[in-house]
Amino acid sequence: MRDVLDKAPPTWRRRRTGRPPFDPASRIMALLVKERYGLTYRDAEIYLKENQQTCLECGMTEMPDHNTIWRTMTKLREPYLKQLNHEVNQLIKKRRKA
């Protein structure tokens, strides 16, 4: 999944003030997990924390909380999210066939 997200164009600009932001790829992966399993934002946070090893193996560098996942959703445009979701699904299908 990380390969798909690394190839995708950046979705927002980083601010120069405040706390360092979460890794954008980790934020988007968390959102894709939420959507894939039909979880609420809080449930997605719990799922990520309970499956940290799997998340790390998928390339997530940080585990965002439910507020960060929600803010990510508000920043993404629907066509962008649909394209990423399509590419990730294609990647999953290829791995299942192998």
Image (cartoon, rainbow, N blue to C red):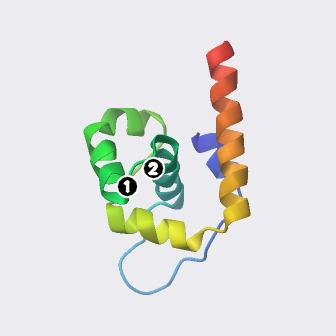
Name which quarter of the figure residue 54 lies in: top left
Quadrant in which the C terminus appears: top right
Q: What residue appears at the point 31 percent right and 39 percent down from the top-left corner?
A: 52
Q: What residue appears at the point 34 percent right and 62 percent down from the top-left corner?
A: 66
Which residue has dot 2 on it?
34
Q: In x, y percent, where is residue 70?
A: 43, 67
Of all residues shown, which one is farthest toward the bottom?
Answer: 17
Secondary structure beneath disc 1?
Answer: loop
**Above or below — where is 33 with respect to 77?**
above
- What residue type is disc 1 on? Thr
Determine whether, in the image, residue 62 is placed left or right of residue 29. Answer: left
Task: Using the image, tell me which numbered label, if any, was put on residue 80.
Answer: none
Q: In x, y percent, where is residue 86?
A: 71, 43
Secondary structure beneath disc 2?
Answer: helix
Quick check: marks 2 and 1 in contact, CB under 8 Å? yes
Q: In x, y percent, where is residue 38?
A: 45, 46
Determine whether, in the image, residue 94 is placed left or right of residue 28. Answer: right
Determine whether, in the image, residue 90 is placed left or right of residue 24. Answer: right
Which residue has dot 1 on it?
40
**Above or below — where is 9 with respect to 51?**
below
- What residue type is disc 2 on? Lys
The one of 22 and 34 positioned closer to us in this rendering: 34
